[in-house]
Amino acid sequence: MIHISQNIEITSGKIADYWIEDGILFSRSKPVKRTVSLIQENIALVKEITQNKPIPLLIYLCKSPIPDKATRQYSKEQLSSVYSAMAMVSEPGLSQLIMKMVFQFQKPPIPMKSFSNELDAKNWLQQFK
């Protein structure tokens, strides 16, 4: 269950919707296939929302098609330019699958952790604000 406070401005992008609460960027993922061009567009959107400052991200994951290798590589390279840490909230197993796909042979460039609920994810992200 996604909780959004009243009077919060939501910015809609092609791969996710975004809003900021208490110094954390929230993202509601959309079930579209990620491509390098979509990721580039999304990074520009996030930088606009965050005024070009890395911020902790709490992302509500959904099932979406697996991106190609070039898109996964590009995403990984760009993470630290937009986020200081990432908490992934999803059904059990989904975030672990994404972590294995993207970071199969190396450590993520930012702190990342999977959660089954929003409260634990928010509490963990507090240290990265």
Image (cartoon, rainbow, N blue to C red):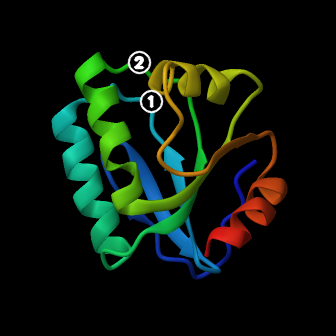
Residue 106 position within the rendered picture, expressed as x and y whole percent measured from the top left: 49, 28
Cα separation between marks 2 and 1: 7 Å
Q: Secondary structure at mark 1?
A: loop
For the point 83% across and 55% down, which residue is it?
120
Query: Which image quarter: residue 75?
Result: top left
From the image, tell me which residue sits under label 2. Answer: 65
Left or right: residue 25 versus residue 13 is right
Question: Which residue sits at x=63%, y=69%?
Answer: 128
**Which numbered disc, 2 or 1, marks the residue that appears first in the sequence?**
1
In front of the other: 11 or 92: 92
Looking at the rendered structure, the secondary structure element under dot 2 is loop
Residue at coordinates 49% horizontally, 20% vertically from top-left?
A: 105
Which numbered circle lies on residue 5? none
> Label 2 amino acid?
Pro
- Mark 2 vs mark 1: give the one in front: 2
Counting from the top left corner in percent of width and height, residue 114 is at 71, 39
Q: Is residue 43 above or below residue 54?
A: above
Q: Quadrant of the C terminus?
A: bottom right
Q: Is residue 34 in view from this perspective? A: no
Residue where numbered disc 1 is placed: 31
Task: Indicate left or right for 69 with 119 as reference.
Answer: left
Label 2 neighbourhood size at 10 Å, few (<14), some (14-19), many (20+)? few
